[in-house]
Image: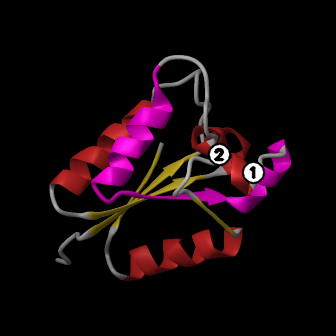
Amino acid sequence: MTEVTKVLLLLKNMVYESTSPMETLRFANYYRKKGLDVMVILFGPMGVILGKADKCGSPAYDEKIRECMEIGVQFKCCKLGASIIGLKGEELIPGIELIESQEIAEMFLEYCEEGQLIITL
């Protein structure tokens, strides 16, 4: 059995109408503190909203994302999902990188080939 050293968390659900964003951030924090490499992909038009800087509302997602980044969690935002809702790169929380859909598809293959963990919320 392959040892899990990396986790890919995919978020594509509504930010303020589901528990998925908070669960994603909690999972990211948990797995990172266990010493795993953690990548969060904000995916689809609803998932990418989590990456937008200066969001209003509760919970305070921006702060939670920054806390995850401080411990080494990486965040990537799907360029296609962002473009569908008109979200520009400069509107993202600093440190979140826009990536193409095919890069996400390649990550799926890489993680599967390596026997790593992929979770969609």
Q: In the displayed structure, would residue 115 be above or below residue 19? A: below
Q: Is residue 78 magenta?
A: yes
Q: Are marks 1 and 2 in contact (CB under 8 Å)?
A: yes
Query: Which residue is denoted by mark 2 in the rendering?
Result: 48
Q: In the displayed structure, would residue 63 be above or below residue 16? A: below
Q: Is residue 82 left or right of residue 29?
A: right
Which of the two residues, 92 or 8, is positioned nearer the viewer here?
92
Is residue 2 visible from the viewing direction of this image? Answer: yes
Query: What x and y, as percent, mark residue 111?
Result: 41, 74
- Crowding near pointer 2: few (<14 within 10 Å), some, many (20+)? many
Query: Which residue is denoted by mark 1 in the rendering?
Result: 82
Is residue 24 visible from the viewing direction of this image? Answer: no
| Residue appearing at x 65%, y 45% in the figure | 48
| Residue appearing at x 73%, y 60% in the figure | 79
Query: What x and y, as percent, mark residue 87?
Result: 77, 46
Q: In the displayed structure, would residue 17 be above or below residue 82? A: above
Identify the amino acid type marked 1. Answer: Ala
| Residue appearing at x 51%, y 58% in the figure | 95
Q: Secondary structure at mark 1?
A: helix
Q: Is residue 68 magenta?
A: yes
Sequence order check, earlier mark of 1 and 2 = 2
